Image (cartoon, rainbow, N blue to C red):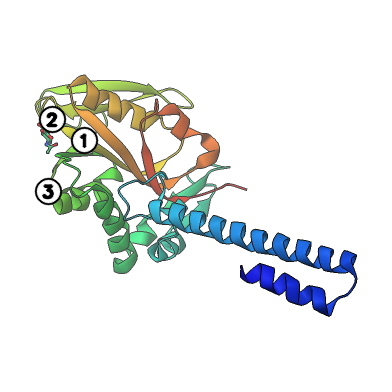
Amino acid sequence: MATNELFIHERHKYPYPSLSLSLSLSLSLSLSLSLSLSFFSFLFFFVSVLNSPTSPLSFTMSAFKDKEDPRLHGIKTKIRVVPNFPKSGIMFQDITTLLLDPKAFKDTIDLFVERYKGKNISVVAGIEARGFIFGPPIALAIGAKFVPLRKPKKLPGKVISQEYILEYGRDCLEMHVGAVEPGERALVVDDLIATGGTLCAAMDLLERVGAEVVECACVIELPELKGRERLNGKPLYVLVEYFEI
Ligand SMILES: *[C@@H]1O[C@H](CO)[C@@H](O)[C@H](O)[C@H]1NC(C)=O
């Protein structure tokens, strides 16, 4: 109604019909434009709320793809990248510098704990060696047991072994028989995912004894090596992405 009144009022002001017509057209056009704009901004707001880390419906699998958690920047800056270690061409991701900073180390653990507490996870399986640094504090905080997945001939009891292919040659992970019961819900933890071979072997070990792998959690992902695609659709959660170039 108000627009009609406005239109009549405008017609008095402008005696030329074409001018008033174009004015009313542009008026209604801008009105509908602003209406649709506000609709889309509402939609956008709704989607962001749905996608927030606290929402039960979390579509993203990386902390940095949710509305960036302010703790992630501190974590990123504490990881030291060492070129050509242990051999030429490799950009080594050194997490020992992260461990030197109690706040960044705690933030790293907290981010994982916030994601996994209350998820009925009874096993945290850590991959030798750096999965032994991040796995146990997560396990303690969510009330799960910690199970080390070790290199061959390190575990004294009866073991189950899983071989996997490396870039050059093979490697193997072992787990104590009886450490994990059939039906238990497990989380696999390592510091980094490169080609994904080690994580695959870890999941195979757990699934062979009847456990359900809920997710793999790593601090760092090297997306260019496409390890995520090798996990047979198993979800992977990472805090930091590192691109070589
Ligand atoms: C939690 O997981 C166990 C298996 O470890 C299962 O038996 C139990 O039903 C689960 N509880 C809930 C509430 O989902």
Q: What residue does disc 2 label?
A: 180
Looking at this view, is 36 or 82 the one in front?
Answer: 36
Q: Does dot 2 land on a helix, a strand or a loop?
A: loop
Residue 4 seen in the figure: yes
Q: Compare marks 3 and 1 and give the one earlier in the sequence.
A: 3
- Amino acid type assigned to the residue bearing label 3 in the image: Gly
- Relative side of 215 to 240, left or right: left
- Residues marked 2 and 1 touching at CB (< 8 Å): yes
Disc assigned to residue 186: 1
Q: Residue at x 39, y 47 (%)?
A: 238
Q: At which x and y percent is residue 225?
A: 52, 35
- Relative side of 220 to 217, left or right: right
Q: What residue does disc 3 label?
A: 143
Query: Marks 2 and 3, Cα distance to the nearest angstrom?
Result: 15 Å
- Amino acid type assigned to the residue bearing label 1 in the image: Ala
Q: Mark 3 near ligand 1 (CB under 8 Å)? A: no
Q: Mark 1 near ligand 1 (CB under 8 Å)? A: no
Looking at this view, is 239 or 171 the one in front?
Answer: 239
Q: Residue at x 39, y 25 (%)?
A: 232
Which of pointers 2 and 3 indicates the residue nearer the eye?
A: 3
Q: Does dot 1 land on a helix, a strand or a loop?
A: strand
- Amino acid type assigned to the residue bearing label 2 in the image: Val
112 relative to 75, above or below? above
Q: Does dot 3 land on a helix, a strand or a loop?
A: loop
Looking at this view, is 191 or 216 the one in front?
Answer: 216
| Other-residue count near label 3 (Cα within 10 Å), few / some / many at <14 / 14–19 / ≥20 | some
29 relative to 176, above or below? below
Query: Marks 3 and 1, Cα distance to the nearest angstrom?
Result: 12 Å
